[in-house]
Structure formats: structure tokens, C-alpha cells
Image (cartoon, rainbow, N blue to C red):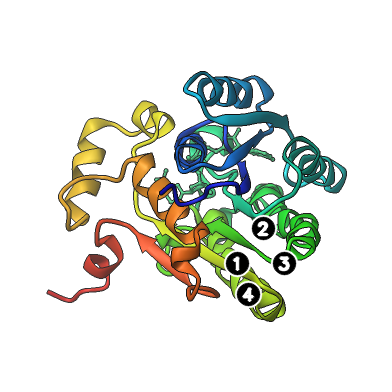
């Protein structure tokens, strides 16, 4: 029995990496998926591949930080599939290859800070703002926000990104608290280092090996590791899980926190 039969889901940041893998997995589990991204052609490619494999998907071009575009994204999913059950907020800005490293706090460009917070925090708030009314209209729903182990730990090179991920943990608790009794669950996933195409292109093999050694599984994550967790958390099997963050980090946070 598929986990998400007859459910409707939106995945933001769905054009690549974790979002693309999650969109494919949610569709495999029976959901109709709106694949949303600021990269419209990328979203279309993912949605087309899902459809070609027999699933249901539509692409949506949206900047998650723009209220009108987020409202239109939700309206597109509802218009196409008749309602909304699941929002996976996952888009991000923070890749040093795109942004430049944040650097030390004393060197941090306030504009870089604002750009990261705009997508990674405001974007997640807006997704919830427009998705929740549609979920309430169906009697409930699930929001799964992509945070990071960085949200509990720290990042030497990326304080803006790390702080944005900690903010997502707080947002997740607040949404869960405000809407839990009306049937909306909200959960965060906290990945360790996940080997997306972008990371493969930007992380030298030596750095990869060094990072893998910190993961107790002896390997870095795959986008599908996160997608499988999102599918479970979005399903009724996870009906007693809300207001928390679930690590999917190969033991990285346990290892980093250990003294031995
Ligand atoms: P990715 O760069 O492959 O995907 C991010 C996607 O977000 C891209 O498709 C991009 O176009 C989209 N995006 C950027 N700005 C947007 C905007 N304003 N509106 C809509 N879409 C926008 O990255 P990824 O590694 O797959 O990351 C996915 C999520 O996982 C992010 O939230 C990231 O912080 C988190 N994460 C990743 C890792 C990792 O190691 N890869 C670890 C922990 C957490």
C-alpha cells in the first residue's frame, strides 16, 4: 500500500538535489506532486520525468520569498489536483558557490545575511502561510521543513546559513503549536552532508572523504535518504510526530557531540 495514496504535495526547491529526489519518492508513494522552484526549466524536467514514469506531477515556477508567487504556487497545486495535504519546504540559498562564503561574523556582509534569511526563513514562513488554509479546508495536513544538523550545531564558514537553519527549527515548533489541534503537523528534517550534484561539483574528493569520516555510517548521505524520511513523516504512519526535528545525518550530530 503506497504511503501517500490520493495525497497532494508541493515540494519547493524541487528542481534539484534533495527536493528532486523527494518529489520522485512522494510520487512513487502515490502523491500528486507540484514540483516548485525558482528554476522553472529544472522543475519542468523533474515533473516530466515523474509523469513519464507513470506518476502525477506539475512544474511550478515560484520564488518562495515572494508572497504573490507562493500564493500562486499553492493555487496551482490546488487547481491542478483539487486540494493540498503536504508541503515540503526545502528551497535554499546558502551554497558558497552561489553566494560566496558568509565568512566570520565580523566580516559578514549584511546583504548576504538578508539574502539567505529571505529564502531560508521568510520563504518557509510564506509556504506555511498560504498552505495551511488549504490544509485546514481538508481537515489537516503536514508541513515538512528541511533544516540541517547545522541548525543544532554550528558552521565555521556559514553563520548566516547556520542561523537560518536554526530559525527553521523554531518556525517548525511554532507552526506545530499553533495548528496541531486543528490537524496540521509540522516537522523538520535535519540532514547531515548529502551528496547532491551541486555538492559533487563543488566539494573536492579529499574534503568529501574527511566529511564522510565524521558520519558514523562511513558514507555521506544521498538525496534519497532524506526523501524517504520526508515521505514517512508526511504519511499517516507518522501521525504522532510533530513539532520536532528528525536528524537524517548518518550519526554526524552524535559523533560531533561526542567527547571520545
Ligand atoms: P540544491 O541547491 O540542489 O537545491 C536547492 C534548490 O532550491 C535549487 O533547485 C534552487 O533553484 C532552489 N531555490 C533557490 N532559491 C529559491 C527560491 N527563492 N525560490 C524557490 N526555489 C529556490 O540543494 P540541496 O542540497 O538539495 O538542498 C535542499 C535543502 O536541503 C536545503 O534546504 C538545504 O539547506 C538542505 N540541506 C542540504 C544538505 C546537503 O548536504 N546537501 C545538508 C543539510 C541540509
SS under mark 2? helix
Residue 96 x %, y %: 50, 39
Side of 68 relative to 35 (left or right): right
Instruction: Mark 1: give few (<14), some (14-19) or many (20+) Cα within 10 Å.
Output: some
SS under mark 3? loop
Disc 1 + disc 3, Cβ < 8 Å: no
Residue at the disc numbered 4: 176
Disc number lying in front (4 or 1): 4
* Residue found at x 57% / y 48%: 90
Residue at the disc numbered 3: 139
Instruction: Mark 3: give few (<14), some (14-19) or many (20+) Cα within 10 Å.
Output: few
Q: Say which label, 4 or 3, has the lower sequence index.
A: 3
Give the residue furthest to the left: 260
Side of 81 relative to 31 (left or right): right
Disc number lying in front (2 or 3): 3
Instruction: Mark 2: give few (<14), some (14-19) or many (20+) Cα within 10 Å.
Output: many
Amino acid at each position: 500500500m503506497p504511503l501517500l495514496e490520493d495525497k497532494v504535495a508541493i515540494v519547493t526547491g524541487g528542481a534539484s538535489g534533495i527536493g528532486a529526489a523527494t518529489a520522485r519518492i512522494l510520487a512513487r508513494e502515490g502523491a500528486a506532486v507540484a514540483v516548485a522552484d525558482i528554476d522553472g526549466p529544472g522543475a519542468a524536467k523533474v515533473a516530466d520525468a515523474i509523469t513519464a514514469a507513470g506518476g502525477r506531477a506539475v512544474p511550478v515556477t515560484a520564488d518562495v520569498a515572494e508572497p504573490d508567487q507562493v500564493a500562486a504556487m499553492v493555487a496551482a497545486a490546488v487547481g491542478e489536483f483539487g486540494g493540498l495535504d503536504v508541503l515540503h519546504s526545502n528551497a535554499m540559498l546558502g551554497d558558497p558557490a552561489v553566494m560566496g562564503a558568509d565568512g566570520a561574523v565580523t566580516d559578514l556582509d549584511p546583504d548576504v545575511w538578508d539574502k539567505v534569511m529571505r529564502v531560508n526563513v521568510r520563504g518557509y514562513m510564506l509556504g506555511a502561510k498560504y498552505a495551511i488554509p488549504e490544509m485546514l479546508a481538508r481537515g489537516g495536513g503536514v508541513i515538512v521543513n528541511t533544516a540541517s544538523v547545522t541548525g543544532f550545531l554550528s558552521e565555521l564558514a556559514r553563520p548566516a546559513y547556520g542561523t537560518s537553519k536554526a530559525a527553521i527549527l523554531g518556525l517548525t515548533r511554532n507552526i506545530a503549536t499553533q495548528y496541531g489541534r486543528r490537524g496540521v503537523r509540522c516537522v523538520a528534517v535535519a540532514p547531515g552532508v548529502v551528496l547532491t550534484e551541486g555538492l559533487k561539483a563543488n566539494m573536492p574528493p579529499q574534503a568529501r572523504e574527511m566529511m564522510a569520516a565524521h558520519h558514523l555510517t562511513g558514507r555521506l548521505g544521498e538525496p534519497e535518504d532524506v526523501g524517504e524520511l520526508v515521505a514517512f513523516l508526511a504519511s499517516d504512519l507518522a501521525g504522532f510526530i510533530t513539532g520536532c526535528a528528525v536528524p537524517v545525518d548518518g550519526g554526524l550530530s552524535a559523533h560531533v557531540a561526542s567527547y571520545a
